Amino acid sequence: MFTGIIETTGAVQSIRKEGGNVHFTIKSPISAELKVDQSVAHNGVCLTVVALGPGSHTVTAIEETLKRSNLGALKAGSEINLERAMKADSRLDGHMVQGHVDATATCTAVDEQDGSWYYRFRYQPTEEHLLVDKGSVAVNGVSLTVVEPVDDVFSVAIIPYTYEHTNFKDIKPGDTVNLEFDIIGKYIARYAKLYSEQRQGL
């Protein structure tokens, strides 16, 4: 379980393919503190540390993860958001984030306004993946508040601290980001669907 509050960013050192899997070696300020088998969110994707190196760690993404996220587009030198799993006694400063990417979205616009940035994204809505104004969404693992969702478009506001300490500063129109929808909203949507199906069966 994660909070969506990014600890730091890392840089992709190398990428190695093995069958349908891809091994990413990441150099970061927290790599030396990690342990093999530890879970770390990479751009919001929960991955297991499989090896350690001097100031670096390696994680493996399976084919399904690569299809459902933007990890397959990473290159050597790409900056990636990192967050270690939440401790049981930690404050939940963001929202409950599982590290399971639901979908991707495409950035359609970036507007700077009075020292902050508004990012607009387009995604494919479904019955289970819904957004509400002022609700929560994780974008590349960052816990954010949804702004004015309309049909298949929504925006988020990025303050200077988040801009400088995540890879949002590198996101530009046309780029793909990872989305994880609020787990509470997903449960409610699932319950509503099952309830509707039961009513139709009466």
Image (tube, helix red, strand yellow):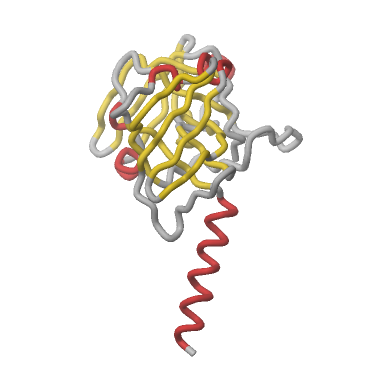
Q: Residue at x 56, y 51 (%)?
A: 183
Front residue (pair 197, 39): 197
Q: Is residue 91 left or right of residue 186?
A: right
Image coordinates for residue 101, horizontal then vertical, percent: 43, 42
Q: Residue at x 44, y 41 (%)?
A: 154
Image coordinates for residue 53, horizontal then vertical, percent: 45, 14
Image coordinates for residue 162, horizontal then vertical, percent: 55, 20
In the picture as drawn, the residue positioned furthest to the right comes out as 89
Q: Is residue 62 left or right of residue 156?
A: left
Front residue (pair 57, 137): 137
In the picture as drawn, the residue positioned furthest to the left comes out as 19
Please determine whether, in this image, residue 28 is positioned above or below residue 105: above
Image coordinates for residue 39, horizontal then vertical, percent: 53, 33
In the picture as drawn, the residue positioned furthest to the front comes out as 114
Residue 105 placement: quadrant: top left
Q: Residue at x 52, y 56 (%)?
A: 186
Quarter of the image where the N terminus is located: top right
Front residue (pair 188, 14): 188
